[in-house]
Image (spheres, rainbow, N blue to C red):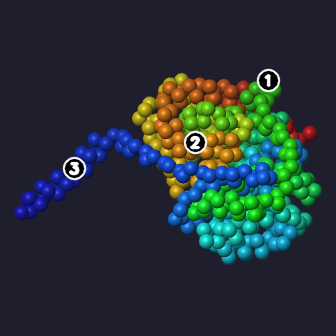
Amino acid sequence: MKARIAVVLAFCMIVPLISRSEQTSPPIPAPPRPVNVPQPAEKTLANGLRVIVVPKSGLPLVAVRLMIMTGGEADPADRAGLADMTASLLTKGTATRSAEEIARDVEALGATIDSGAAWDNSFVALSALASNFPEAMGYVADVVLHPTFTTEEINRLRDQNIDALQVALRQPQSLAGFVTSRVLYRGSPYGHSLGGTPKSLSAIARPDIVAFHSKYYRPGNAVLVVAGDVAPAAMFSLAGKLFGSWQSGSVPAVPQAGSAPPATAEPRVVVVDLPDAGQAAVVVALRGMRRVDPQYNAALVANAVLGGGYSSRLNQEIRIKRGLSYGAGSAFDFRRMPGPFVASAQTKNESAAEVATIILDELKKMTATAVPGTELTPRKAILIGNFGRSLETTSGLVGRIAQLALYGLNLTEINNYIHDVEAVTPADVQAFAAHHLLPNQATVVIVGDSTKFLDALRQKFANVEVIPIDKLDLDSATLKKP
């Protein structure tokens, strides 16, 4: 009996070993499940406000996003951060409610309200219980139509933002991002920090904020997106009641934010010397794409392969194989005009030049050879899985629909996402990379202790520019103090 038990135990130990030895690659992802978002209903009010409703019965929460179709791209050259400050102050007091009253009353309704700005839109977002939704919507209308922009709240927000910036400007990764915007978009409205700088924020006064709100916060320049257990007809009626008095008016055109730099402009290698920095931040950047570009889906898939997750090529090469960073990745920032493509990693100062070279080498590989199907399939599966999860909440659904509306895309495109991603082939990815991810057109920015990597960097790159931290000026197109 004991001998028989021993044989059985030995067999049980061998089977897992055999199974593990035979499993040489991850299992193939299952076919994606289809997505069917209900057909949005929409109506444009007499004053020009576009209202979009995605009805989903039985959900406890209703999500709302009211977008102004203008954001940081409209910041004046010497008032970087104006759009974000204006939007952030909306919930800090109206003609009939203080900031404290808004926060307290919205919370009492079991709701949340938030506001802010991106590069090409400003927004107010609301999430509320379906039963309290009509009352909660009143707060959205109030903060958009009747903000007071008190001096006290402006000063408080300015101080908070400057304090946060002072901290960020001592961090290599944050500082590298600010510098990259200036280098990549020098001379254009994308060439500044969305949140501003200490100098630009200090220059923003109440008349600037009031003027920005008056100029751009118009119903013809706005879209209201609602998703949840709401009947479209009831929502259209509520929108008319709350926003019908919003006065229309002409909205000035926004400068072409992503316009190309001068023809003589060349990719640059810029080093910001931050003595005693514990690590170096390495950024490789290119002009990216507009959201409406026909190659949008190819861009998503190409980035998923290159730097969009733990199993991406950049993370494999920089973190997993070489142990040079806790993580490396890349992303496209799709905007109204071509936003940036950025690949980045933080590493020890001594390996900054090596990491920059690895990133550029991986870009070159993307252009030179097709991605194997065994690599492409799981990367597309991750994109599709993330997309499906984003639709599980009303706020995620509103975000997806709002993005389509912002860029003038057909709202039914949301149901085509899975098919369009699945349709991207290895040849499509290689062709896209060969056109959009050229390493010889990339700008390199490194922020760190240059004494530990500058010699190695100069061996790999010509014309390295070094800016000492005490000579850096983020408010100047040259990045240098006079």
Mark 3–mark 2 distance (CA, rounded to whole Å)? 48 Å
From the viewer's perspective, is residue 391 above or below residue 311? below
Three-letter residue code for mark 2: Glu
User: Which secondary structure, mark 2?
Assistant: helix
> Closer to the camera: disc 3 or disc 2?
2
> Closer to the camera: disc 3 or disc 1?
1
- Left or right: 228 in relation to 450: left
Which is more N-terminal, label 1 or label 2? 1
Mark 3–mark 1 distance (CA, rounded to whole Å)? 65 Å
From the viewer's perspective, is residue 50 above or below residue 313? below
Q: Is residue 135 visible?
A: yes
User: Which secondary structure, mark 1?
Assistant: loop
What numbered label is drawn on residue 15? 3
Q: Label 2, on which residue?
A: 413
Three-letter residue code for mark 3: Val
Three-letter residue code for mark 1: Ala
Q: Label 1, on which residue?
A: 263
Q: Nearer the viewer, residue 107 or 312?
A: 107
Residue drawn at x 82%, y 68% is: 93
What numbered label is drawn on residue 370? none
Which is more N-terminal, label 2 or label 3? 3
